[in-house]
Image (cartoon, rainbow, N blue to C red):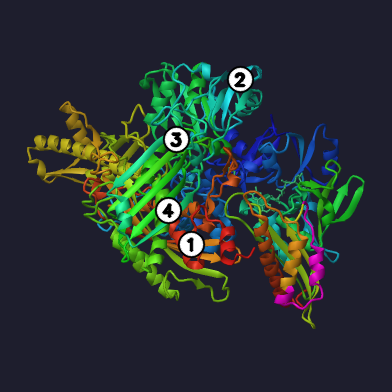
């Protein structure tokens, strides 16, 4: 027996062999606020306090806790200092008993997906206890290994400082300073907390792995040992015979279609005998057992014989004549072309041409919550899928296909998601769990561990981009020619779309008379590549923004001036032949950043922002600034119909509900929808409930990708709310015999002729008329044209400019990003708190892509097989971020808004590499930045 | 397949040794577990019958000045070492090294004994102890012995201890004297594996009259299969005036003496050569500076 205190309660419990503290807390004590992100002592999500000290519970043997005191997130609120309870407690307003730290995290917008939140708050709590008058430096030191992939590090830091102040002084938690929309409406453009922030701060939020069903089985997947092979034989009998194993399935057991995909169904659910294994993540067999450990042991008993084939490990090789064909259609997923004018003429007309080839690396989304799916057969013969998915309706379709069922028999119930960033658009374990649940008749949970997550889900495309630019001596671009190779990996996923964006964005947000681009999206034996925040536009613009600085140098023109001269503006024609008629705020972004950068640089004694500035006492530490701009489409574009449905209902208690299947992955869509409906009804957003991601209860909002949700689903919700409001107006107008324009909505009431009528009464009136107080609206975004046909390829673009200050250590080659000044034209800042989170997260992800992140694959075999080998930025690597919001509204966007989710990371990367050049004269043409290369090129000392 | 069957929270050193010897199957010592648990979980270490936990043994969690030496129990976590006033005073290199291991959570459980016990050629705590001329106290059921740190290692990941019959009780570090100082530095790569590309610890004694390096000890990891001192480099520097020329000579010998290699996705041999020079120069300079600050402060 062991005795421990958990959250102040004595617990006596029989130890179990091999149990970690995390398991004891989560599984046996049901305290699921403690999260598991890696089980490698790397991410800090599982942090709890043992005798007041933060430890990672995933690597802490449970039995060591014998006699110790444990604090988990669930126990924190009860530790609120008395002084604070009297003065600062806002539990009435926030509706729950909260510790000041929890309150500060909520009000400062430090919570996005919330998966890291319990670990952050507990680590911070221990720090405040140890050092009540803590500083920023203390916070950064203490939180170094408590990772946040949504990367709201600046907000986290400020929230902790605010909470510490409040605890020390007994004053209420100070609110954050947030840039609001320049023209806020009633709710839109003002501060609104995430509706799910409280449960995320208190540890009661349930993510998929936190759900347990009676009789639930645990599944594991047997995957390939080779990146390219033919499956010769498969023997699962020994695994079947293992006690505790309930079911083992192979390809022949699939009742429906044995493939899935988002565009092309080329990805086998299970590889069959004689069939081709195309990457190491390919599934050969699936096991369901009474426990995860038994399922894992069963995998070791499965005997698979594979005959290895030549591995195609890069897209250039994949296009060679003699490369083996990975798919029946060959290795070319798509040849994408952009043509404008005649580049040869453009180059002939130029005074200067420059040519260079750039390389971008494979990266992983590394969302902190690994994939988890639960399939549960229902008594009426249907299948429920509990999963954090970016496209619930696509999941439904693909699961139904594999089961051979009509779609309606499957219900996908989206759960809170611990981040997605594009990595939860494809099928992970949904189909496998459903197949096993169907055969066993029991609920089946399939949880990926971090290693499996890194191996299986699609990554960001590695690219090779050859770029040639021509310009006049005065800086006018005459022609751009690009040739791209995209490594789309084993399966199509969204590869064609991603590389399409990469191609179209490869000449940057500039106008030029001649442009020609060819892109080859190639299948290889690497993990598939698909959607990832930035969606190809990131890779393409790394190359061009690097090239623009080279061109500026060659022409001896200021790099900002060169960009200004060529920047897209209203009236410009893009490289795909689209004339920009409105909402093109690039120039304003550029001007704002230029001015701020020069002001900061001048204050620091720079000769020019782009000149090197050695530190006075340590001349080997050299600083400089770098500049870059970017644009990114909102929505699918390219002729793909882009629509979303939302339903808005008014309830008798006067509250509203918005329903749509669109996904909340932490980015803040739910908050936006809440605010939109509240705005239309002039009521408090707290009175609006939002239900998302349930294919039975919510209409199809389409995929959460391409920065489209605020625009498309935001519009659907807005029009649904507006239509409902008009219907209510009609009812009230008739009832009170008033013209409809005399009816107003104020503070959740309808005002008619001096009367204030609760909205609940309107519900009754409508029902009496036989009308439902509910409107479903299907919004169709403006039509777009396919690439190559001219016209509007996209219905909106976001624009951005950034300046980055770096410090390079000339002895070691180490690079530190000090400050990032950002301006984003987002049309309209609907939800400033959410926007701040997107900006912080976007910049930090950009820093990661430039400096720390690299998913390494060698001959089809991932070297990056665990989180310890994939570095995402931590709080100590987070620069100071200075943000300007630019609002050039787009006419059809909700209140003028366009996408913000992806634009931010894009310019950060080339701005960093440009700054490195300005500091030490080393041109970086390959990501991530290699510190060895920097020293080598500086001194050629070796 | 449980990773272990039985967990024994040992109360004394002999209790731990007994448990280790008497377990019916495989038995392994566990301190913080930040190496061992991960090895077990990732299948790099086969499941074991008994884990013998040594973190609650009072003798092994002591950190004190004992009979003219600094004693650091093997089970003292890095967080405690790095914050300790006496370690900062007498073994600055170790305080710095321990403060760099992992992150704050890891440092709250990971121990110095585990760092040495894991026997990796570039473990931060180990490299610092090596330059500080530390000795380990090793206990077996037969008794205790003292072993100079360098003699604890047989190869990468292999110690010379009998895994079923011996354990590290703690480490003795000579107390600092006037004009002595130490320093530690490491260089990491921001991508890939979070093991130092190179780390360096330096201890030196300054001759206050002649401004020469009276004595010096240097360890650099990884500079071979086991943590070790670079004696040729030490010999080159000993007795020399501290100036750029001497530093340059030291750097030259280090590159010859250390056996630097290219490790995949971490560093090339060439970068290690270059960095060894930078680190040696920086640690020597820092220790030299500190030896002035330390003039006469020791009691
Ligand atoms: C995220 C992370 C980051 C890390 N960063 C670093 C780093 O920057 N630098 C670094 O050097 N290391 C690092 N490590 C490795 C590890 O944390 C350290 O080596 C740590 O000091 C190991 O101590 P421990 O107490 O956890 O050892 P354990 O895992 O408990 O034990 C390690 C080995 O030593 C043996 N052992 C333990 N105690 C004794 C004893 N008293 N006598 C004999 N043998 C014993 C064990 O049997 C085992 O073989 C990191 C680990 C993680 C998870
Ligand atoms: S550190 Fe424990 S789950 Fe990541
Ligand atoms: S909020 Fe930190 S990981 Fe999402």
Percent coordinates x, y for residue A625 in the rendering: 44, 66
Residue appearing at x 55%, y 69% in the figure: A621
Precedes in sequence: disc 4 or disc 1: 1
Residue tagged 2: A234
Tag 1, which chain?
A
SS type, badge 1 = helix
Residue bounds of the magenta highlight:
B225-246
Residue tagged 4: A543
- Tell if the residue under mark 1 belongs to the same chain as the one under mark 3: yes
SS type, badge 2 = strand
Residue tagged 3: A388
Quick check: A194 left or right of A476?
Answer: right
Residues packed near mark 3 inside 10 Å, few (<14), some (14 to 19) or many (20 plus): many
Residue appearing at x 21%, y 33% in the figure: A763
Per the rendering, the mark at residue A165 is: 1
Q: CA distance from mark 1 to mark 3?
A: 36 Å
Is A287 one of the magenta-colored residues?
no
Of residues A204 and B290, the one nearer the viewer is B290
């Amino acid at each position: 027996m062991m005795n421990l205190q958990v959250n102040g309660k004595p617990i006596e419990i029989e130890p179990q062999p091999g149990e970690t503290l995390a398991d004891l807390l989560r599984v046996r004590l049901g305290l699921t606020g403690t999260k598991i992100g890696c089980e490698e002592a790397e991410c800090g999500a599982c942090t709890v306090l043992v005798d007041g000290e933060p430890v990672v519970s995933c690597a802490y043997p449970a039995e060591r806790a014998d006699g110790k005191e444990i604090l988990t997130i669930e126990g924190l609120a009860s530790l609120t200092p008395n002084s604070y309870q009297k003065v600062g407690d806002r539990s009435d307003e926030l509706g729950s008993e909260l510790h000041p730290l929890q309150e500060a995290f909520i009000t400062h917008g430090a919570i996005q997906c919330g998966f890291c939140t319990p670990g952050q708050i507990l680590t911070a709590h221990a720090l405040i206890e140890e050092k009540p008058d803590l500083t920023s430096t203390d916070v950064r030191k203490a939180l170094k290994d408590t990772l946040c992939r949504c990367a709201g590090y600046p907000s986290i830091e400020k929230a902790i400082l605010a909470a510490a102040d409040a605890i020390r002084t007994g004053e209420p938690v100070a609110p954050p300073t947030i840039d609001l929309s320049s023209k806020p409406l009633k709710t839109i453009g003002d501060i609104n907390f995430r509706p799910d922030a409280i449960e995320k701060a208190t540890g009661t939020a349930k993510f998929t792995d936190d759900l347990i069903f009676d009789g639930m089985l645990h599944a594991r997947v047997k995957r390939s040992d080779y990146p390219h092979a033919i499956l010769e034989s498969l023997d699962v009998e020994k695994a079947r015979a293992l006690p505790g194993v309930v079911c083992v399935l192979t390809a022949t057991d699939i009742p429906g279609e044995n493939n899935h995909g988002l565009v092309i169904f080329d990805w086998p659910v299970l590889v069959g005998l004689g069939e081709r294994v195309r990457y190491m993540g390919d599934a050969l067999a699936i096991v369901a057992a009474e426990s995860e450990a038994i399922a894992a042991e069963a995998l070791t008993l499965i005997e698979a014989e594979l005959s290895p084939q030549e591995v195609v490990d890069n897209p250039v090789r994949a296009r060679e004549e003699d490369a083996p064909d990975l798919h029946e259609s060959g290795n070319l997923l798509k040849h994408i072309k952009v043509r404008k004018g005649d580049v040869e003429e453009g180059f002939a007309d130029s005074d200067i041409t420059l040519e260079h080839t750039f390389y971008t690396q494979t990266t992983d989304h590394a969302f902190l919550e690994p994939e988890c799916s639960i399939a549960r057969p229902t008594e009426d013969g249907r299948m429920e899928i509990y999963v954090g998915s970016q496209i619930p309706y696509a999941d439904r379709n693909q699961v139904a296909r594999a089961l051979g069922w009509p779609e309606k028999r499957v219900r996908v119930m989206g759960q809170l998601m611990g981040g997605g960033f594009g990595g939860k658009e494809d099928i992970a374990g949904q189909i496998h769990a459903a197949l096993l649940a169907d055969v066993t008749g029991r609920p089946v949970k399939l949880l990926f561990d971090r290693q499996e997550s890194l191996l299986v889900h699609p990554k960001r495309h590695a690219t090779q981009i050859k770029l040639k630019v021509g310009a006049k001596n005065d800086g006018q671009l005459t022609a751009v020619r690009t040739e791209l190779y995209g490594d789309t990996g084993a399966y199509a996923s969204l590869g064609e779309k991603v590389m399409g964006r990469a191609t179209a964005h490869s000449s940057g947000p500039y106008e030029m008379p001649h442009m020609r681009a060819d892109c080859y999206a190639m299948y290889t034996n690497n993990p598939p590549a698909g959607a990832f925040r930035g969606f190809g536009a990131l890779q393409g613009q790394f190359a061009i923004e690097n090239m623009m600085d080279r061109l500026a140098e060659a022409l001896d023109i200021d790099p900002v001036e060169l960009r200004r001269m060529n920047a897209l503006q209203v009236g410009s024609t893009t490289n795909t032949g689209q004339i920009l008629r409105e909402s093109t705020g690039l120039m304003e972004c550029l001007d704002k950043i230029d001015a701020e950068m020069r002001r900061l640089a001048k204050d620091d004694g720079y000769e020019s922002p782009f000149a090197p500035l050695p530190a006075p006492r340590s001349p080997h530490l050299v600083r400089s600034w770098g500049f870059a701009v970017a644009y990114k489409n909102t929505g699918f574009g390219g002729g793909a119909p882009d629509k979303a449905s939302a339903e808005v209902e008014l309830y008798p208690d006067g509250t509203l509900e918005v329903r749509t299947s669109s996904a909340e992955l932490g980015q803040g869509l739910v908050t936006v929808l809440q605010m939109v409906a509240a705005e239309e009804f002039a009521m408090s957003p707290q009175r609006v409930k939002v239900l998302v991601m349930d294919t039975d209860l919510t209409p199809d909002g389409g995929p959460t990708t391409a920065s489209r949700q605020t625009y498309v689903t935001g519009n659907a919700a807005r029009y649904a709310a507006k239509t409902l409001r008009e219907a209510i107006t009609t009812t009230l107008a008739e009832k009170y015999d008033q013209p409809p324009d005399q009816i107003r909505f104020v503070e959740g009431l309808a005002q008619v002729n001096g009367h204030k009528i609760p909205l609940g009464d309107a519900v009754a009136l409508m029902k009496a008329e036989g009308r439902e107080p509910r409107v479903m609206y299907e919004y169709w975004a403006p039509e777009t044209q396919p690439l190559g046909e001219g016209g509007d390829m996209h219905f909106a673009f976001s624009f951005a400019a950034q300046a980055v200050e770096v410090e390079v250590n000339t002895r070691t080659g180490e690079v530190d990003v000090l400050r990032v000044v950002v301006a984003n034209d987002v049309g309209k800042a609907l939800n400033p708190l959410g926007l701040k989170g997107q900006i912080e997260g976007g910049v930090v992800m950009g820093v990661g892509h430039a400096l720390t992140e690299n998913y390494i694959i060698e001959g089809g075999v991932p070297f990056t097989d665990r989180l310890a080998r994939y570095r995402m930025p931590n709080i100590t690597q987070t620069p100071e971020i200075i943000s300007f919001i630019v609002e050039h509204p787009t006419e059809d966007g909700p209140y003028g808004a366009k996408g913000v989710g992806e634009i931010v990371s894009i310019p950060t990367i080339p701005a960093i590499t440009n700054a490195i050049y300005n500091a030490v004269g080393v041109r970086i043409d390959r990501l991530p930045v290699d510190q060895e290369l920097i020293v080598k090129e500086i001194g050629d000392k070796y | 397949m449980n990773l272990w069957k039985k967990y024994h929270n040992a109360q004394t050193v002999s209790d731990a040794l007994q448990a280790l010897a008497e377990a019916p199957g495989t038995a392994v010592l566990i301190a913080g577990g930040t190496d061992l648990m991960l090895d077990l979980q990732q299948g790099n270490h086969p499941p074991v019958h008994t884990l013998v936990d040594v973190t609650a043994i009072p003798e092994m969690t002591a950190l004190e000045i004992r009979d003219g030496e600094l004693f650091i129990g093997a089970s003292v976590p890095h967080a405690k070492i790095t914050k300790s006033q006496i370690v900062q005073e007498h073994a600055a290199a170790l305080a710095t090294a321990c403060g760099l291991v992992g992150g704050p959570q890891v440092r709250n459980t990971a121990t110095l004994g585990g760092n040495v016990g894991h026997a990796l050629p570039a473990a931060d705590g180990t490299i610092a102890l090596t330059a500080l001329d530390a000795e380990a106290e090793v206990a077996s059921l037969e008794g205790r012995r003292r072993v100079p740190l360098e003699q604890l290692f047989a190869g990468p990941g292999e110690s010379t201890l009998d895994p079923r019959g011996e354990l590290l009780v703690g480490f003795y570090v000579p107390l600092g004297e006037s004009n002595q100082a130490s320093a530690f530095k490491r260089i990491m790569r921001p991508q890939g594996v979070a093991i130092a590309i190179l780390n360096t610890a330096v201890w030196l004694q300054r001759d206050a009259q002649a401004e020469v390096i009276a004595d010096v000890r240097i360890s650099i990891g990884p500079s071979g299969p086991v943590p070790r001192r670079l004696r040729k480099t030490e010999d080159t520097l000993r007795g020399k005036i501290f100036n750029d020329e001497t530093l340059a000579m030291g750097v030259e010998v280090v590159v010859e003496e250390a056996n630097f290699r290219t490790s995949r996705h971490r560093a090339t041999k060439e970068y290690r050569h270059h960095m060894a020079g930078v680190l040696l120069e920086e640690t020597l300079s820092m220790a030299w500076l500190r030896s002035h600050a330390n003039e006469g402060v020791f009691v």
